[in-house]
Amino acid sequence: MRQRLRFYLGDELREIGDVDPTLTVLDWLRLSERRVGTKEGCAEGDCGACTVVVGRLDGDAVRYEAVNACIRFLATLDGCLLLTVEHLKGQDGALHPVQQAMVDCHGSQCGFCTPGFVMSLLALYLNEEKPDDRRIDDALAGNLCRCTGYAPIVRAAHAMYGIGGQGSDRFADREAWADRLKALRDEEILDVGTGGRRFLAPATVPQLAQLLLDHPGATIVAGATDVGLWVTKFQRVLATVIHTGRVGALRRIEDRGDALVIGAGVTYSEAAPAIAALYPDFGELIRRIGAEQVRNMGTIGGNIANGSPIGDTPPALIACAATLRLRRGDETRELPLEAFFIEYGRQDRREGEFVEAVILPKPGPGERFRAYKIAKRFDQDISAVCGAFRLRLDADGRVADIRIAFGGMAGTPRRAAGAEAALRGRDWSEETVREAMAALSGDFTPLSDWRASAGYRSMVAANLLMKFHIETSDPAADTRLAGDRRLAHA
C-alpha cells in the first residue's frame, strides 16, 4: 500500500499523507492553501462558483475536465493535475486568453461567479476548438450568474479562441503533462487518512473486491456527486471510504457486438457518445443530468448502485433491457437491472458486493426508443418523472414487444407491467394507447412531494405514453419544445 496522496497543483507536485478522507478540494484550497479564487456558493454542485479543472490520464492522453471542488474529495485527485484560476496568470502577469475575453466582452460584474466561469471556459478552451452556441451553453449550464447575464459570457467563449499572445498556456502541452502524470501511475492501493478514518483507493478490480470483503461497512465512492452532499449538507462522518476512480478496468466501454459493456466507473460524459450513437434520446437524457461538472464526475454505476427512485439512467436502461453485472470477491453474477431494485433504499446487493458493469443491448431492427425527463428546470434539475419507452411493431403494425419504465412514480425505478400488457399484441393506435394510459393507474401509486403532486405525476406519466405514440406515428408532429427536436423523428 502507498500511504501518500500524490497529485500536481499546477506545476507543483504535492505529496500528502495525513488527510481527512472526506476533505473537499474546495476546503483544502481555501483553508490550507489560501487559494481563495475558488468560491463556495451552494456546497452541493449546483452553482459552479467552485469550479476547478482536473487533468487526468485517459489512456495515454490527458483529459481536462471542469469539476465541482465543493463536493469532490481531495484524495480522489491522486495521479491528477489540479488547476485553479490562480494558475492562469502568465509569467509576465498577462491574462490568459479566457480571462482577456471575459474582460473584452464585459463578462463580469460583481465577480463572485467569475472564477468558476473562467475555469469552465478553460476546460472548453483546452479540449475543443470553435464550439457552437449549443456546446457553449452545455459547458456553462452549471455556472450561475445573477448580475452579468449570460450573453456577454457566451460572447467571451467565442472570442477566447481568437486571442493570442496574452499569456502562456503551459497546460496545453498534453504530451508533456501525460508524461508527468504517467510517472505517478502505479498499481498500489492508496491508503491515507487521519484520526483512525481511512481513504482507500485500489488500482485493480481484484484489489477493490478484496477491500470490500475486508471492509464491508465502507462507503463506496465513485464521483461523490451524491456522497459529497452527505458530507457538506448532512455533516456525516464517514469512517472508511473506498474510491473506485483509480480502477482503470471499471472505466472502459467494450463493444461485444450485440451490446455495450459499460464499466461501473464510466462517467456520464464518457458514456454519452457511445450510448447516444445507439439511442439518441438516451444521449439527450444524459445531457440533462446535472451540469457538465457533475457529468464529468458522476458515473453510470454509481447512479444505479445509489438506488434512488429518481435516478435518471435506470428508467432508460430498464426500457433497453439492460443487465447488471455484480461482483463479490472472485464471484460474479448477472441479473436484469429491473430486478436489482427491490424497494426504496434496498437493492439486491450482498455485503461486500459491488456493481462491476452494465450491459446495454443494442437496439434491434425497427425498434424505437424514447426517453423523457420532466423537471422544474430544463437543465441541471432533479426529475419529477422520468419515462422511457422501447417499442417493436410487427409487419401488421401491432405491438410485438414494448417496455415502459418510469422513475419518480414509485419507491424504485419500475416497469409499467399493466400498461405493457394492455398494448402487447394489439394495434399501435390512439385507442389502444388510451387504454394503456388508463392501465398506468394500476401500475403506480406515486407520492406527493415538493417536486410534484401524486396527481401531477400520474397525469404526466400517462401523457408521456401518448407523446411516445405521437412521435412514433406522426413524422410531422412537433413535440419537442427544448433540446434537440430532431430526436422526435429519429
Image: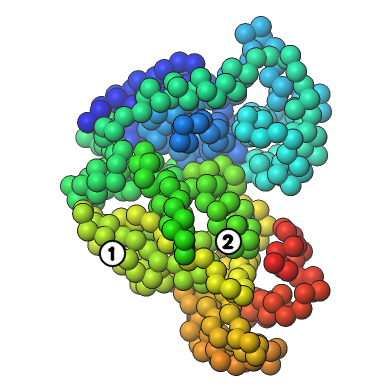
Residue that carries the numbered disc 1 in the rendered image: 333
Q: Secondary structure at mark 2?
A: helix
Label 1: which secondary element: strand
In the displayed image of the protein, which residue is found farthest to the top? Answer: 92
Are dots 2 and 1 in contact, CB under 8 Å?
no
Disc number lying in front (2 or 1): 2
In this rendering, position of residue 310 left or right of residue 284: left
In the displayed orientation, state which residue is furthest to the front: 257
Please give the name of the residue rendered at 26% of the width and 60% of the height, measured from the top-left corner.
332
Which residue appears at 35% of the width and 42% of the height?
247
Residue 426 visible in the current orientation: yes
Q: The disc labelled 2 sits on which kind of residue?
A: Leu
Relative horizontal placement of residue 143, taking residue 25 as reference (left or right): right
Point out which mark residue 87 bears. Answer: none
Q: Residue at x 29, y 33 (%)?
A: 187
312 in relation to 253, above or below: below
